[in-house]
Amino acid sequence: MPSSKTRIAVVGGGVAGLVIARHVVAKLNSYNLVLFEQTDHIGGTWVYTDETDVDKHGLLIHSSMYKNLRTNIPKEVMAIPDFPFQDLGGPSFIHHSLIKKYLMSYAKHFNLYPYIKLNTLVKRVEPETINGRTLWMVTYESLETKTETTKIFDAVVLCNGHYTVGRIPHIPGIESFRGRCVHSHQYRVPEVYTGKKVCILGASWSGIDIAMEVLQYADKVYLSHNLPEQLKSKISSNLEQKPGVQSIQGNIFTFRDSSTVEVDDFIFCTGYKFTYPFMSAKVEIRTDDDHVEPVYKHLVHMDYTNLFFMGLPAMVIPFPLFHIQAQYILGVLEDRIKLPSAQQMREEYEIEKNSLLDKGIPLRHINKLKDRQWAYYDQLATAANVTGFLPVVKKVMTHVLQMREVDFTTYKNYQYRIIDSENFSVSYCKPC
């Protein structure tokens, strides 16, 4: 007899995959779950490896974690709402290894491991219409036995991450550069840049973070970016800000202000591409310009409302966001959340997109929610009838961003304490 339970396939065992699994596992009378993870660990990008190219199975290294990375969000607001971090003392911005331990504890606490297939590569996700319903044929391969299997699912949740395939803009003359050239995806340790002249392209979170590490060893760091203003922090004397790189000839870099410098090593901190290599061509997914369409509420495919994308928004507080997204997904599957028609979703989406474009936000930045994140959390939480973000979270993040603006070399030295839903305390910890 066919099961009456809804069969859910989750692609990816990073934070988003674990969070949706936790909510599905809480309702095993209604659901069957399989979570597919291609590596031998849960944790996604939080699993550090010295490797930078391909893994033992010849697959691209998934994680972009570098050795010294600390979070850029305080653990007090970064935590998954139903699983707080242990109080560790010291600054709130913690080393990535503690996040990995936290995620392993989360998976154990909610008994997720029995539903996770490690070392399993999803090769194809294909929609099939059966008796008027869209079902999903998921073909996967055991990387250890090389056996391939296809199973049918009622819904698919894509949690395959966004930090694996680096976006590298073409710069005229780049092929003539003879120095070391990597994307931040391959960056691991700063010591290899000792005594070098290094150009870092991009001044978002990772660009600044990596520049702060490299300048401790490099002879000179040129932080190249097209931000409208120079970064104002108290920067080391061996760091110089430059506009974007216009062209390269050998080791000579020419910037957009026509100035030139000699460079030994080049690091692209230019973001990542969204990729869904396993998805059937029957399913329209446009990922050009760092933007995924047609997706409603950054979450639901407009033509296939049992296909979900977790983790598309950037410049957000990701772990608690996944907690709300997961409950929204189950609300859709349980028909508690009534979605508009495909045409209505498209119309609503186009109005919002055009409004943002008219405000001067380029397409590639639409998923960077920034100040729009708070309304987004509230929308999803209200629709799913679950608790949204407490007001104190926004207050803490406002303080973090203010401290980062004052001095991005010291903002991670603060310790935050949540007092209640509205209030927090903060103190400065001297670095060790």
Image: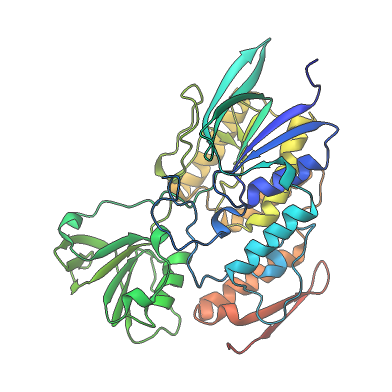
Vertical side of 420 occupied by 6: above or below: above
Which quarter of the figure is the C terminus placed in?
bottom right
Residue 297 left/right relative to 32: left
* Residue 407 to residue 33: above or below: below
| Image coordinates for residue 93, horizontal then vertical, percent | 62, 73
Left or right for 170, reference 52: left
- The residue depicted at 79 percent of the width and 21 percent of the height is 3
Left of 58 or right of it: where is 98?
A: right
Q: Is residue 387 left or right of residue 292?
A: right
402 and 384: which is toward the camera: 384
Residue 225 horizontal/vertical position (percent): 34, 65
**Residue 279 placement (x, y as % from top left):** 50, 30
Using the image, determine if residue 253 lies above or below residue 2. Answer: below
| Residue 385 at least partly seen | yes
Residue at figure coordinates x 37%, y 63% from the top left: 202
Q: Does residue 231 appear in the picture of this structure?
A: no
Please name the residue shown 73% across and 53% down the image: 107
Q: Is residue 43 above or below residue 206?
A: above
Occupied quadrant, residue 212: bottom left
- Residue positioned 80% across, 15% down in the render: 1
Question: Which corner quadrant of the image does residue 29 belong to?
Answer: top right
Toward the front, the furthest residue is 145
